[in-house]
Amino acid sequence: MIDAVVHGDPSTADRTIAGPGTREAEWHGWSGWSELISIGLDDLVPEGTRLVVVAPHPDDEVIAAGGLLRLAAAAGRSTLIIGVSDGGGSHPGSDEWPPAQLIEQRRAERRAALQELGVRTDLVCELDLPDGGIGSARERLVGYLDDLIHDRDVVISPWRFDGHPDHEATTSAVQTVIAAKRPPRHAVHLQAPIWGWHWASPSGGQLPTTDGAVLHLDSTAHRRKITAMSCFTSQLSADASTGAPAILPDFVLQRLSRNREVFLR
Ligand SMILES: [Zn+2]
């Protein structure tokens, strides 16, 4: 079936995350791959600038930019990971994962994943906003980000139309903070689709490739990213106590384990 090409911003109804979403095999044939500018570390995060990855949940930094984080770490670039929520909302009603235990587990998973990427774990700033409620804590988030994001930083957050309310609220706050900074030393903001790969489709035209870039990962960065993803064990298996499926089942992991990462303006 050919989807209608979207003109203008996708609606909230378009951005529903349900079912298996768009399969990775379908994305293989996406025309956007040839429209995106192929870019390397030095172009994305020039020497002398700092890479800041803003992650709504523990794992989003690796999913969005694990390969870039690996390359930046290997090149000695200054880096900051901003963990926005505490991650305590991924298993509602679970006896297997009571929230306090889940929060500790997810912190440990993030640390292990960053170690796999060679990123220093003391470069993580955890804001501990409520998982599932980032939008309602927007004002606090803007205040935190205003302190943490500096001029000339290269800031990565999820795509503004990613579909997950926490992801979209996070990026909205980043946009507000960066818009208040003035050229010529303003920060650069790049947006990485995460759940956008799920709800959007190759024929739908929802992902804007104009000014977008693709980073091709070398075999080491790709391998390290996949190993880092495997550290998020709480997200990788079903919950027997609630019957809920894994947050990141195989069909999602296939999309997120590519050897290329996409960054949109
Ligand atoms: Zn997330």
Image (cartoon, helix red, strand yellow):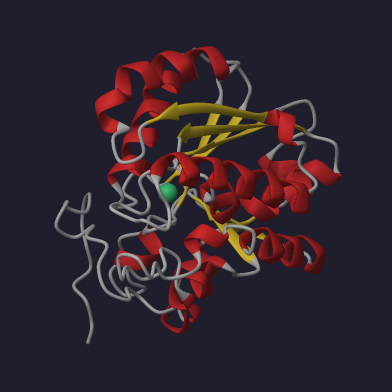
Left or right? Give the position of 64 relative to 159.
right
Q: Position of residue 237 (x, y in %)?
A: 48, 69
- Identify the residue at horizontal 54%, vertical 50% (top origin): 59
Count of numbered marks? 0
The relative height of residue 208 versus residue 34 in the rendered view (above or below) is: above
Determine whether, in the image, residue 257 is placed left or right of residue 68: left
> Residue visible at 55% across and 55% down?
63
Image location of residue 106, percent across then percent down: 54, 46
> Which of the 4 image quarters holds residue 218?
bottom right
* In the depicted structure, whether residue 228 falls above or below residue 253: above
Q: Nearer the viewer, residue 45 or 256?
A: 256
Q: Residue at x 85, y 46 (%)?
A: 74
* Figure check: 66 above or below 131: below
Q: Position of residue 257 (x, y in %)?
A: 59, 69
Residues 264 and 217: in front is: 217
Which is nearer the eye, 123 or 184?
123
Left or right for 87, reference 15: right
Residue 245 visible within the image: yes
Viewer-closest of 200 and 114? 114
- Residue 262 in percent (x, y) is at 54, 56
Extreme residue toward the front, this view: 95
Task: Answer yes or no: is residue 180 visible.
Answer: no
Residue at the right extreme, as displayed: 75
Residue drawn at x 31%, y 75% is 203
Q: Quadrant of the N terminus?
A: bottom left
Q: Quadrant of residue 4?
A: bottom left
